[in-house]
Image: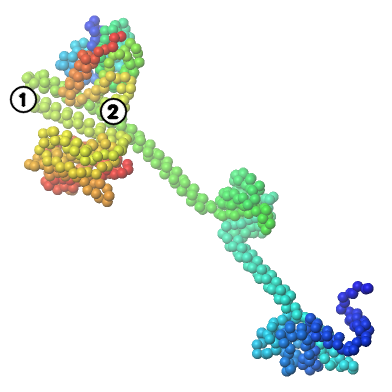
Amino acid sequence: MTKPTPSTDRSVELTELADVRRRLTGLHDPAAVLEGLFTYAPVGLQIYDKTGKSVVVNRAFRRIFGSAPPPSYSIFNDEIADRAGMLDAVRRAFAGATVEFGPLWYDPREIEHVAVTDGRRSAVKVVAFPLNDGTGALQYVAMVVTDVTAEFAAAEKLRQTESAYREELELRERRFRALIDHSSDGIALVDPSGFVRYQSPAVTHLLGYSVEEEIGRDALKQVHPDDIPALLEALRELPSRPNGSVRTQYRVRHRNGEWRWVESVATNLLDEPAIGAFVFNYRDITDSKAAADAERRLSEELERRVLERTAQLEAANAELESFSYSISHDLRAPLRSIAGFTRILLLDHAAQLSDEARAYLQRVDDGTRQMSRLIDDLLAFSRLGRQALRRQPIDMTALAQQVVAERSTESDGQRVTATIAELPACDGDPALLRQVVVNIVDNAFKYSRHRENPVVEIGSRIDDGTPVYFVRDNGIGFEMQFASNLFGVFQRLHLSDDYEGVGVGLAIAQRILQRHGGRIWAEAEHDRGATFYWTVGGEE
Amino acid sequence: MTGDQATQILLVEDNPNDVELALYALKRQNIANHIHVVRHGKEALEFLFGSGAYEGRDLESGPRLVLLDLKLPLVNGLDVLRQVKADPRTRAIPIVVLTSSREDRDLQEAYQLGANSYIVKPVDFEQFTDAVRQLGMYWLLLNEAPRS
């Protein structure tokens, strides 16, 4: 047996046909072969007469197109075939040629008013060939129609998918390129040997170079020589860390010769097939670095000034301290002599003195006592600033009661009617806050004692959640315009002849309360009594 | 100056006015008649240790009490205090610091060095004589000195 060889050679086909005729002898009806093959062939078969009218179609044809053409049908009037681009080829077949065409879409849906088929859309490959009579004149044209709808649809779908995919890729590529091209940050790809393989257009506005002159350049070429060691050190581990990245700052020479500070994030994408390089994302930080430097210098300067100022204050404080120290020694000593010898004169020699001399000596004696108190108060006041606060809860009611009780044993105090309300507790230094209450209560006693019925009231109220303590008297009061003088050292609103004291008590009270974070103020009217208010505060 | 009589009180004071007032107060209170006065810290040490100007002084003869000012020329009071309290021969002598300083740091240091009392000289003369009387009474009359 010879192996059948597929061939389109016409002579081979004729030989094969002759062979069929020769072999199929003795049949009752040789045409039955043709009829059977025609009927059952899986390809569509159609025969036109020479005017183009469909003479006969087989089953496969009806399956492909949904129905047989109506009697009125002529291929030359078939708009669908015309639209599908079939007619040229069909005409050539009617002119006597064997033509093959397709695949093409025979799509009746495009012309809905033509009831040619049931409307199925088919892709077909067609072979059309003439059938002649004995004289060689054309009688019929036969068409062999292969339905390739499934393959064709698949191929077309594939084509569409591919095209859509290509478009998507192009879109993405364009999008990323646009991002890179318009990014204000520069992006460079540097190959493992240190040469620039890609440079984004941002390099031009960042550093003045064109992309072309950058490509292939040694990546370190424009880096400031002083910054190269640190940069290399920072990048040292990067090659062994796939996808790792390092942030660095260094200077790069601009095309105009200036040094620009850049911050750069280098990422190892050597293993990324699409990249295969180190990616440097960099931006110009010259201005922000200059601003940060200026800010740092400013804050250093401020810090320096604060230190200086603190040192000055500490020096002043130390000076003040040694001043108070020498006051306590040096001023007291001569005063003690004056007081001592004056007393000796008055004690031992009074008999030899005139009344006038004794009166004068008495004044010297009073003067020394007053000066002694003055020095003590001044020292006490200066000590306040240095003493550490020891805060603890204080029962203010008990404290006020104690202070008033102490006053009541004095002759002046016995006359004063003092009332003490329940007072809220507070946190503070017990010794210092006691001094505050003593000074304020003393003040109230002192300035109300000339009244017929001196009354001192100690109470409290709450202002914005903060306890406000007060001491109210019905004494001589003062003019509010002088209220700000009340709390200064040695400030007095009344003649010292009338009221003893040197005028430090309220200043001390204010200093103590300020150190606690509280404050003190007063309200009064001349001859109508005064009220002193204070808060203790929470923090120093 | 180094009489045969036992010295009851050594007064270390550079200010002549304060010396006079102290002596007045002590006499007035009839506390002590035998008071030796030195004017600076160096002299105080020489007296107490029987050296220098006081070479050969019998240390057994007193004093029974030292009244010591802190602010002294040459050797200051705290140094005197330190040396007296560091020496076994003089350690037992009560030392009363008599000063015009109210500074905490002086008081703290004086007590740390072994001062037996610390009196701030009051400006008020009555208070001063009262203080002198009390400390004299206590240290000379009531306090039993340890036998050496």
- Secondary structure state at the residue bearing disc 2: loop
Residue sitting at x 62%, y 47%: A235
Residue A276 can be seen in this image = yes
Residue A221 drawn at (x, y percent): 65, 50
Left or right of B37 on screen, residue A234:
right
The amino acid type of the residue labelled 2 equals Glu
Task: Tell me the number on the disc at residue A167.
Answer: none
Label 1, residues with CA under 10 Å away: few <14, some 14-19, many ≥20 = few
Which residue lies most toward the left here? A355
Between residue A49 and residue B36, name the one nearer to us. A49
Residue sitting at x 9%, y 40%: A450
Chain letter for the residue marked with disc 2 in the picture: B
Please identify the quadrant where the N terminus of chain A is shown: bottom right
Q: Identify whether A229 is placed above or below A326.
A: below
Task: Tell me the number on the disc at residue B103.
Answer: 2
The amino acid type of the residue labelled 1 equals Asp
Left or right of B44 on screen, residue A174:
right
Which residue lies most toward the front here? A28
Q: Identify whether A240 is placed above or below B145.
A: below
Chain letter for the residue marked with disc 1 in the picture: A
Residue A318 drawn at (x, y percent): 33, 32
Per the image, the residue denoted by label 1 is A355
